Image (cartoon, rainbow, N blue to C red):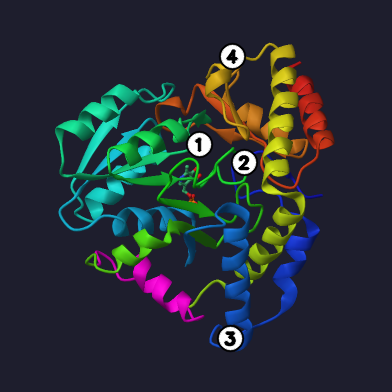
Amino acid sequence: MQPILLNPGPVNVSPRVQQALLRGDLCHREAEFSDLLAAIRTKLLHAFAPQDYTSVIIGGSGTSAVEAMVSSALPQGKKLLVINNGVYGERMLRMATAHRIPSVELRYDWTEPPDLGQIEARLEADPSIGGVALVHHETTTGLLNPVSAIGALTRRMGRVFLLDAVSALAGEDLDLVRDQVDICACTANKCVQGLPGVAFVLVRTALMRAMQDHPASSLSLHLPVHWQAQERHSVAFTPPVQACYALDAALDELLEESVAARVERYRAAAQLLRTGFSRLGLRFLLPPELRVNSLTALFLPEGMAYHDLHDRLKQRGFVIYEGQGRLQTGIFRVANMGHLSLDDFRRFLDSLEDVLG
Ligand SMILES: Cc1ncc(COP(=O)(O)O)c(C=O)c1O
């Protein structure tokens, strides 16, 4: 029996996506791979950004796509303002430092949304800030950051808006045009419901063209290197061919379901779970208005260690996820991403009730 994965990726995928792995061996310099690449890039734009955007496929995990975005988006000498209210905001700062990109930080508690007035003041005071970086779904806590408001503010202030949408895309309401996102990074193996190994960046075509003049701080993560090759229906480096097959199948599934219906399915699953958690007397880390559709962070029940809860649920077929950083020992996380049904979540709640006694 496959375990039910309630960690925020890699997720359970459909038999169709699993089967896609078996399409066979393929040389990435052959026409069949060029066709596969073109199909994936077209489907990505169809699903998420029909106009004025281009897509770039990156071999690697979500971190590679985010680092490619952070290291490529700004011209030399411009600073990056990073909004940091969790592990993944913090990670973007570390990426900027690693690439010698000057950065400034607006830091908030992990359970707090950012303050728009502070962002505006910081941008007004420092014209050398060229971009604002935000995490849409801060997976550390399941916190939903206000993308639309920060996108509008960033555009109004004439800066580039960078979004880490690794755990949000296809799970949250996001419209790159409406929300004024200039560039966003994502991975195949979370709400897109593909397999690990391939990630991607969606970027406004005008920005992508401008990036070609930015000096490269890395060879293998410099977005123009990938984009230029992919525009020629080629790839700069060896791609994860089989993970691309799986992504292609996952995108077919997503387009058949529709992104809006996927988001709604996740919302309904989270609602069912949260009603169950309340009934079992569990306490939520975040208030309802800050919670995403695809993950719930809960305080551990009094007297119960995470590993005990985890192991007893795993014996029953369910994999939950621990907290990170300073929340590691106090909370646990339950994601509802992937090819799962409401019945899977009902069975999980029954098992949880059983374990909690
Ligand atoms: C918001 C966010 N950004 C980046 C990452 C990094 O992705 P990966 O673990 O695939 O490198 C994650 C992983 O969970 C994430 O949730």
**Tag 1: amino acid:** His
Upstream in sequence: badge 4 or badge 2:
2
Q: Amino acid at mark 2?
A: Gly
Residue identifier under label 2? 171
> Looking at the image, can residue 122 be seen?
yes
Q: Amino acid at mark 3?
A: Cys
Whole-percent x, y for residue 199 in the image: 51, 59
Contact, CB < 8 Å: mark 2 with mark 1? yes
Residue at image coords 27%, 24%: 118
User: Callout 3: few (<14), some (14-19), or many (20+) C-alpha neighbours within 10 Å?
Assistant: few
* First to last magenta residue range: 216-235
Circles 3 and 2 in contact, beta carbons < 8 Å: no
Q: Residue at x 69, y 29 (%)?
A: 270
Residue 135 position by quadrant: top left
- Residue 265, given in percent of the width and then of the height, sits at 74, 37
Query: Which residue lies at the image location 43% right of the left edge and 43% below the top edge?
Result: 180
Which label sits on residue 27? 3
Task: Indicate left or right for 352 with 28 as reference.
Answer: right
Q: Nearer the viewer, mark 3 or mark 2?
A: 2
**Residue 241 in view in this figure:** no
Q: Which residue is mark 1?
A: 137
User: In 3D space, how far apart are the residues under numbered discs 3 and 1 (Cα atoms)?
Assistant: 36 Å
Report the residue marked by disc 4: 303
First in residue order: circle 3 vs circle 2: 3
**Secondary element type, mark 2:** loop
Q: Is residue 48 left or right of residue 101?
A: right
Alpha carbon separation for disc pair 3 and 2: 33 Å
Precedes in sequence: disc 2 or disc 1: 1
